[in-house]
Amino acid sequence: MSSISIGVLKERLEFQISQADLLAGTTQSIVCPVDGYIDGMDLIVETAVTTGGTVTLQGGGAVYNIEGGLDITSDPVAPQGDTAYLPAAQTQVAVITIGAPSSPGAIAVPNHGLVPGQPVTLTTTSALPTGLATSTTYYVAQRGWGLNNFNLTTTAGGGDAGLITTSGSQSGTQSVVSGAQGIVPVTNCSQVVPNSAAKGTIYPLNVPAGDNTNLVKAGQLLQITLASFATAGALNGFIRFRSNR
């Protein structure tokens, strides 16, 4: 009996940028349909670009993509047909594991609904473990993220540089207060289109091999932002990612 090995499913999200949108710097918003990791972004010149610019992929907070009936959290539940952002502030009771960041993360909150890069603060009825403080803004880390757990970092966007290690002990009830789900650049996903880019030219952008920092979640808002384009041009393209499904 033979067997077949199936690799990671590669998927893509297509987008189009008209000349009017290109010159106005209009942001394109896309809702990610499934969990996965960004592999890269390919740009194709649809109409010759006179004055080039930069196209950057950014990742934001989780949203409801309600046209597909997608609900990424149970609280609150948006009625089908609506688009509802998660609340700007929500307090959830947390259990903090003492020690270095782990996978799954060191902060345990069942069904927390937070996404990597989201700012949070901590509260306590008594004392937080050493390494954490109230009235300090932390970010949900990309490393060790899970549906019920996450690590904290001091780096905006959820990067590894400021991962928090805790020590000592804690007492009382600890809570995580989630802040607005900001839009942050996706690591290594900014592409320059040069001046006089000809129609049909393809500008591929590949994330470095082994880069697992570009986690995207079902329902997460992805945005294409534009800078410096002028005079003429139009683009289309697609975001490539490895699906977890």
Image (cartoon, helix red, strand yellow):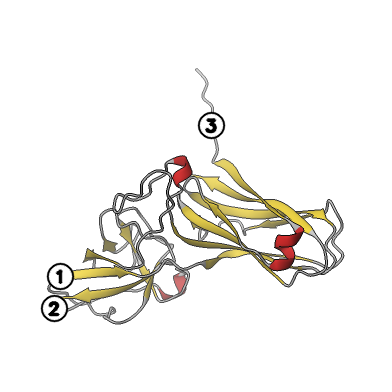
Give the number of the mark in front: 3 or 1.
1
Mark 3 vs 1, N-terminal side: 3
Q: CA distance from mark 2 to mark 3?
A: 53 Å
**Drawn side of residue 237 relative to residue 35, left or right:** right
Q: Give the residue pinned by disc 2.
A: 126
Callout 3, which amino acid?
A: Ser
The residue nearer to you, when weighing 169 against 134, is 134
- Kindly identify the amino acid type of the residue bearing the numbered disc 2: Ser
Task: State the residue at coordinates (35%, 74%).
Answer: 164
Residue 107 found in image quarter: bottom left
The alpha-carbon separation of the residues under discs 1 and 2 comes to 7 Å
Left or right, residue 201 beside residue 134: right
Secondary structure type for disc 3: loop
> Does the rendering let one see residue 98?
no
In front here: 48 or 38?
Answer: 48
Q: Quadrant of residue 140?
A: bottom left
In the picture, the disc for residue 236 is none
**Which comes sooner in the sequence, label 2 or label 3?**
3
Can you give x and y, in whole percent of width and height, for residue 157 in the image? 48, 69
Label 1, on which residue? 173
Q: Can you give x and y, in whole percent of width and height, for residue 9 in the image?
A: 55, 40
